[in-house]
Amino acid sequence: MARVIAMLNQKGGVGKTTSAVNLAAAFAAHGHRTCLIDLDPQAHMTLHVGLDGDSIDCTVYDLLVDPQRSIEDAIVKVDERLDAIVAETDLAAAETELADQSGRQDILARKFVAIADQYDVVMIDCPPSLGLLTLNALAMADEVFVPMQAHFLALQGVGKLLETVGLVCQSVNPELEVTGVVLCMHEKQTNLAREVVDDLDTFFTESRESNVPWRHCRVLQPPIRRNIKLAEAPSFGQTIFQYDPTCRGAEDYTALAEDVIARWQHGPESQSPPATVDAATEAPVDVDSEPTEISGAS
Ligand code: ADP
Ligand code: MG
């Protein structure tokens, strides 16, 4: 039975797509049969793995609006042990087309059952909104990962997101849990980043005893450092492991996958070391770590 992870943050440009693609690729490289699902009408995940949704016969859109289409028809091979179900630009229309249909929030979850045994991990890239597409992702997910940047106000957005997941738990998916925060484009040496990470750690530690869906959540290790290669890889339609398997981005996503796998093996109690690492332990800055100003593509 596959573990289904939804990469969720209603804010755009935080690293959802980058993390979905490269973490999935890291799982595949680790021997896990992995499937990526693009639920964002912007189809960035689809492009990132070198596919064009508009020229693929069966996409997420078809699965949502056409009861006759089966999920097996939508699977496209990307790499060894890595498959994808892609998005096309029409996907935006699905929200309105399905507006009156009953059971519209778990169409994908019901179709997914047919292939659940074919995979170890399924990674869903969510759109930057909390509408019907995201609801379909959350209805089929076991876990939510929240990619974010350690910025001022980032915590407020996370609060809203957790509230939404809480509501989804009550209505469509009581088993859903928020299990990890992925720190993206991270700059550990800043005080602000350190404070935000400390606040997150404190918040999640205080939630341990309560019955909220994020009681097992923690800041996943390591943070993903800002790395220009991660921003370049999508325009070549390649995962970071295809584009530059030795860069820091590839290193970070490999280590992150190992952290996640360790927790799956040893249970949620297996804690990684505290997220705040002393600046002195930072690797020396190399050419591809130069901070770049990248505005959210969405
Ligand atoms: P989202 O899916 O949340 O909108 P993306 O994954 O598309 O966010 O990331 C937003 C932008 O930041 C993209 O241009 C992406 O290439 C870039 N980016 C993401 N993570 C990193 C990183 N660790 N270092 C450098 N650039 C990054
Ligand atoms: Mg995206």
Image (spheres, helix red, strand yellow):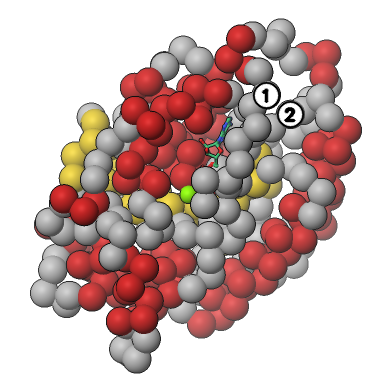
Q: Is residue 291 above or below residue 74?
A: above
In front of the other: label 2 or label 1?
1
Cα separation, mark 2 vs mark 1, equals 9 Å
- For the image, the number of numbered tags is 2
The image quarter in which residue 228 lies:
top right
The disc placed on residue 187 is 2
Return the disc, 2 or 1, that comes first in the chain's sequence.
2
Element under disc 1: loop
The image quarter in which residue 203 lies:
bottom right
Residue type, numbered disc 1:
Pro
Residue type, numbered disc 2:
Glu
Asked if the residue under mark 1 is in contact with the one under mark 2, i.e. CB atoms within 8 Å, the reply is: yes
Is 55 on the left or on the right of 196, as rendered? left
Residue 281 location, x and y as percent?
78, 14
Is 6 on the left or on the right of 282, as rendered? left
Element under disc 2: loop
Residue shown at 74% from the left, 42% from the top: 150
Q: Residue at label 1?
A: 291
